[in-house]
Amino acid sequence: MIGVTIEGMDNLQKIIRDFPEFGYRRPIIAAMRKAAVPVKAAMIAELPNNLKGLKKAFRVSPGKSKEPSMLIGIFANKATYRNSKGKSWDTYFFALWHNYGTLNMRANRFHNFKRGVRKTKTPGAEGIKAGLFVERGWENSKFKAQYEFEKKMDEEITKFLVKNKY
């Protein structure tokens, strides 16, 4: 880790005064993007073999709030799947069903559904079993993401201080 020492209150006030009001967003977003790479890769690696086609739907996107944030996961309207009957489906739905499950196979501990499990009269119609591959990918990569974020933030802060000759 790189240490930065600021001597004197005058230097500190000069740095704060010269730093643009929203200038902090760019280095933080850059660091978050760098940290999102191993998370996205881990989520794709956790996909079951029959869902490897969903990797096109994984995206990394900066959040739109005032506070810097990063969204990682499967987004709607990014890829489509055409079944044997010719009907097109958004891959987001397949990812949702296979990650959280359907009917009696729902993973309620991670995801709250608005409607309860309905009763089925057909034996064996228990739904799609929850794979929880998104959660496993996050758990497997969160420490790597934290390391990448801290490393990139150190680089960005140092670059800012060198550029502005502090």
Image: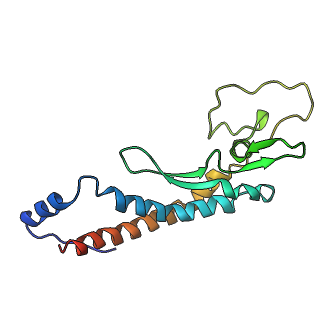
Q: Residue furthest front?
A: 86
The correct choice, above or below, for 114 with respect to 20 in the image is above
Query: Residue at 65% across / 50% down in the picture?
Result: 78
Near-viewer residue (30 or 100)? 30
Q: Quadrant of the N terminus?
A: bottom left
Q: Is residue 86 left or right of residue 30?
A: right
Query: Residue at 86% across / 26% down in the picture?
Result: 120
Residue 162 falls in image quadrant:
bottom left
Q: Position of residue 33 (x, y in %)?
A: 47, 61
Q: Position of residue 109 (x, y in %)?
A: 63, 38
Q: Is residue 107 left or right of residue 86?
A: left
The correct choice, above or below, for 125 with respect to 12 in the image is above
Query: Residue at 24% across / 52% down in the picture?
Result: 21
Q: Quadrant of the C terminus?
A: bottom left
Q: Position of residue 55 (x, y in %)?
A: 69, 58
Residue 129 falls in image quadrant:
top right
